[in-house]
Image (cartoon, rainbow, N blue to C red):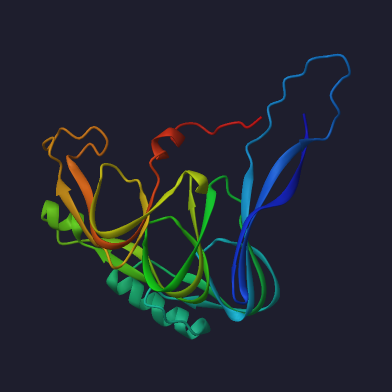
């Protein structure tokens, strides 16, 4: 059976003159069901696309995320240190990235218009930064718009635990504006934990983002080196202090083959 894809706005978030829309594409059969016959219908899984509305400001997208744009928007490469500046900045940064082993660029857009990302089956989580920093799980960043700098955070927690000199590099968003992250978990299933001088310990990679004011460490599980059934390594992630944590407790339920929606 053939389908046609129809888009609706699943959710939106705006602040000042910037806005993010999540478009959801659902499949509709092109043929009507036969009258008097029971027909089982397996619809393809839904797809999602992010629309980033820019009005005289700056938007930053993960490299390769752009599908198309409308409006007067100038493209420039943005390095992990937050610098840019067109082709010259791109080439200078490429040399630096090659020398240091740092990951390549995000893509910046300046002006007025709308950017559309490549459709994905992952869910898109929208949020707002208000003069703060957010450390994001590697691979989760999609886009941000407003006065936000996309940098890099070297997480030494696990490296210190196992005696390695190399830390895990993660995106770090700093400033004021809107951001979008991607995850197999729907936004409704996330818990945004407001911590006030507390301690949170998580067994498994369930945290997609946390604010920079929290102290992050990796600690040995009380169950012993080989006793952790979820991490498989006998370690837990610990967050201490005051801030916010985006936690997805249902992530293990979304593992497995691609689902079909009815």
Q: Position of residue 213 (x, y in %)?
A: 28, 68
Question: At which x and y percent is residue 133?
Answer: 37, 70
Q: How many marks?
A: 0
| Residue 112 found in image quarter | bottom right
Residue 137 visible (yes or no): no
Residue extending farthest to the front is 196
* Residue 49, image quadrant: bottom right
Rendering coords of residue 24 (x, y %): 66, 49
Q: Is residue 138 left or right of residue 189?
A: left
What residue is shown at x 40% (from left), y 82% (from top)? Answer: 92
Looking at the image, which residue is at 41% across and 78% down?
Answer: 82
User: Residue at 68% of width from left, 27% of height from top?
Assistant: 42
Question: In the image as oriented, which residue stretches furthest toward the right?
Answer: 35
Q: Position of residue 260 (x, y in %)?
A: 61, 31
Toward the viewer: 161 or 131?
A: 131
**Is the residue 155 above or below the residue 235 in the image?**
below
Residue 12 in sight here = yes
Left or right placement of residue 217 versus residue 171 in this view:
left
Residue drawn at point x = 15 percent, y = 41 percent: 221
In the picture, the quarter occupied by the C terminus is top right
Q: The N terminus appears in which quarter of the rendering?
A: top right
């Amino acid at each position: 059976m053939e389908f046609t894809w129809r888009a609706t706005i699943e959710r939106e978030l705006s602040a000042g003159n910037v806005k993010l829309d999540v478009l959801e594409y659902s499949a509709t059969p092109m043929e009507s069901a036969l009258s008097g016959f029971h027909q089982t219908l397996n619809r393809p899984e839904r797809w999602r696309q992010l629309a980033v509305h820019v009005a005289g400001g700056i938007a930053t997208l993960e490299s390769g995320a752009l599908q198309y744009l409308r409006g007067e928007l100038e493209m420039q490469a943005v390095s992990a240190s937050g610098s840019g500046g067109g082709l010259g900045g791109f080439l200078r940064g490429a040399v630096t990235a090659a020398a240091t082993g740092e990951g390549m660029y995000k893509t910046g857009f300046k002006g007025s218009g709308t950017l559309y990302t490549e459709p994905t089956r992952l869910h898109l989580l929208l949020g707002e930064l208000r003069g703060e920093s957010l450390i994001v799980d590697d691979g989760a960043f999609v886009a941000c718009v407003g006065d936000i700098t996309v940098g890099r955070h070297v997480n030494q927690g696990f490296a210190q635990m196992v005696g390695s000199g190399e830390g895990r590099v993660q995106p770090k968003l700093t400033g004021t504006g809107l951001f979008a992250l991607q995850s197999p978990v729907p936004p409704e299933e996330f818990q945004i934990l407001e911590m006030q001088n507390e301690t949170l310990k998580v067994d498994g990679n369930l945290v997609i983002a946390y604010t920079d004011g929290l102290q992050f460490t990796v600690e040995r599980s009380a169950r012993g080196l080989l006793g952790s059934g979820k991490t498989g390594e006998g370690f837990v992630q610990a967050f201490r202090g005051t801030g916010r944590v985006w936690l997805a407790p249902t992530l293990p339920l979304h593992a497995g083959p691609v689902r079909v929606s009815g």
